[in-house]
Image: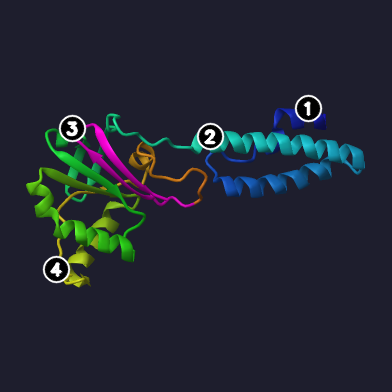
Amino acid sequence: MIWRRLRSGAFIAAIPQEISINNARNAACKLTESALVLIGSGIFVKEIAKTALLKIITLKIKKMEEKQAVSMPRIGDKAPEFKAVTTQGEINFPSDYSGSWVILFSHPADFTPVCTSEFMTFASMADQFEKAGCKLVGLSVDGLYSHIAWLRTIKEKIEYKGMKNVEVNFPLIEDITMEVAKKYGMLQPGESSTKAVRAVFFVDPKGIIRAVIYIH
């Protein structure tokens, strides 16, 4: 009876599908101990059952890791399409930018020092990008209201290397569902954190990815 339940994976049914890998491993340890209590006191039987159970759990975790793994589009690929809400209204990417170069870049989180300096630098150079026929689009997995508050803070309170009163006029994507981040491989597989890594995609006027910068 116990063996049949082990083979069917009944003891690990309690591990949710959308759990992080680290939490899954912790849950696996607890479930293993619980199963051993039910199996009995026979040492030999316990060891066989423990080995079988750990194999089942390992396979489940491996499948979860494969499911969470996100591939990143490569140079020469068509930029993945998406519709998103931004600080400048809704956009359809990359169709809204047809005929122009676009730099799509992500940052881990609003209100962090490095991200703030990056946005201030990009915003202060926006006219230069515009003259070069290039648009800017930012992204993080924070919400729209967080984005708005952060950009207002940058304009009203932050001064950095001679830059102050900097207004960010290019779109900053709200991606709390992580849909866009997943399409562009901006999330680290197996990580408990949901922050996007720093990634930059250079998209040509035909919507083709021509260069990628990816910072782990």
**Amino acid bearing label 2:** Glu
How far is the residue under mark 2 from the one under mark 1? Answer: 26 Å
**Residue 42 percent across, percent down from the top left:** 92, 41
The quarter of the picture where the N terminus appears is: top right
Q: CA distance from mark 1 to mark 3?
A: 54 Å
Whether residues under marks 3 and 2 lie with C-beta atoms below 8 angstroms apart, the answer is no
Q: Residues within 10 Å of mark 3 (few under 14, many from 20)?
A: some
The residue drawn where x is 17% and y is 72% is: 162
**Residue, disc 2:** 66
Contact? badges 4 and 1 (CB < 8 Å) = no
Report the Cα–Cα distance between label 4 and label 1: 68 Å
Helix, strand or loop at label 2? It is helix
Q: Is residue 111 visible?
A: no
Q: As drawn, which residue projects farthest toward the left? A: 131
Query: Of the residues shown, which amino acid type is indicated by label 1?
Result: Arg
Neighbourhood count class around disc 2 (C-alpha, 10 Å): few under 14, some 14–19, many 20 upward? few
Q: In the figure, is residue 20 to the left or right of 95?
A: right
Q: Which residues lie in the magenta part?
A: 193-216
Is 188 left, or right, of 76 in this rendering?
right
Mark 4 highlights which residue? Answer: 165
The magenta stretch spans residue 212: yes
Distance between the alpha carbons at the discs numbered 2 and 4: 45 Å
- Dot 1 corresponds to which residue? 4
Tell me the element at label 1: helix
Give the residue drawn at x 24%, y 31%.
208
Q: Which residue is mark 3?
A: 95
> Is residue 60 one of those drawn in magenta?
no
